[in-house]
Amino acid sequence: MKQSQVKESSTAELQEELGKSRKEYSDLKMAHAMSPLENPLQIRKVRRSIARMATELSKRELNG
């Protein structure tokens, strides 16, 4: 998810998407541990997306 999409999303949508992304990240990590992924950069992409969403949620919490 791109930063512009993150900022436009509601808090509920971000929390839902964050949960899905965390599940996807753990699945990718597990699959990569079993046998190498065809494109291991997927892991980085998902991890960074999770960080973007978590950061935005934190900002919203602090700002009220």
Image (cartoon, rainbow, N blue to C red):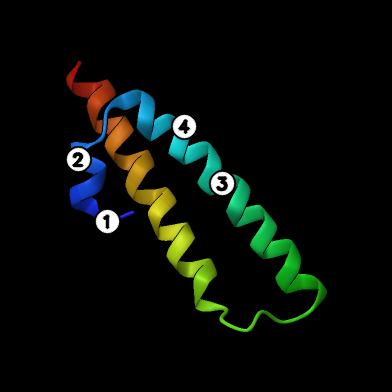
Q: Residue at x 23, y 52 (%)?
A: 3
Q: Residue at x 31, y 31 (%)?
A: 58
Image quadrant occupied by the N terminus: bottom left
Q: Amino acid at mark 3?
A: Arg
Q: Label 2's element? A: helix
Q: Please rate how many residues cluster around mark 1, counting C-alpha atoms within 10 Å: few if below 14, some from 14 to 19, many from 20.
A: few
The one of 4 and 58 positioned closer to us in this rendering = 4
Q: Position of residue 12 (x, y in %)?
A: 37, 24
**58 lies left or right of 17:** left
With respect to residue 17, does 3 lie above or below? below
- Name the residue that disc number 4 marks: 16
Residue closest to the far right: 34
Q: Label 1 vs label 2: CA separation?
A: 9 Å
| Lower sequence index among marks 3 and 1 | 1
**33 lies left or right of 13:** right
- Name the residue that disc number 1 marks: 2
Which dot marks residue 31?
Answer: none
- Name the residue that disc number 2 marks: 7
The one of 46 and 9 positioned closer to us in this rendering = 9
Q: Label 3's element? A: helix
Q: Amino acid at mark 4?
A: Glu
**20 lies left or right of 48:** right
